[in-house]
Image (cartoon, rainbow, N blue to C red):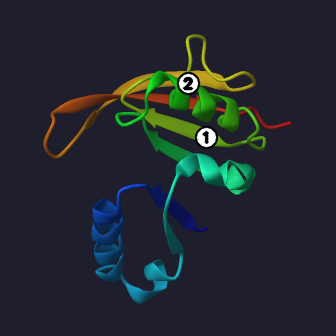
Amino acid sequence: GVACGVESCPTLHTAASAATLRLEQEVQQRVLLHQGDVLDMQSDWHQASVILISTDALDDSRLEQVTLGVERTSPGTRVVSIGRPLGVSGPRGLVYVRQVLYRTVGSGNAPVFIYRRPST
């Protein structure tokens, strides 16, 4: 599979690109990094089998847009939201799996909310 990341901050995108160069060549070929707005790429989300979203920098309006976007994912897709849950009752069509704590580098534990779109 291929991993795709979208980072809006140019400095963090540069850091991610540099980190990718430290991976084995075979792994580097499966990593696609984009610098821009994650909401501009929603039309491609249906191709993903796992979507990882950090909600720390999203205001309520953008979080709602992300929630609506993941409602259009394909069967079997897993969605992981770091920081806040997606919507009040979760994304429509996705099943809430569980909440866990994720140990971050600098800010301690962050809540992680895991969802999945049932396979047909």
Secondary element under disc 1, as helix, strand or loop, is strand
Quadrant of the rendered image containing residue 72: top right
Residue position for label 2: 97
Note whether residue 49 is visible.
no
* Amino acid tagged 2: Val
Amino acid type for the residue under numbered disc 1: Arg
Q: Which mark is residue 91?
A: none
Can you give x and y, in whole percent of width and height, for residue 9 in the image? Answer: 35, 57
Which badge, 1 or 2, is on the more N-terminal residue?
Answer: 1
Q: Please name whichever residue, 99 or 83, is drawn nearer the observer in this view of the structure.
A: 83
**Identity of the residue drawn at 28% across and 30% down:** 110
Marks 1 and 2 in Cβ contact (< 8 Å): yes
- Image position, residue 111 (x, y; %): 33, 26
Left or right: 108 in relation to 15 = left
**Residue 3, x across and y down, in percent:** 53, 64
- Residue 78 tag number: 1
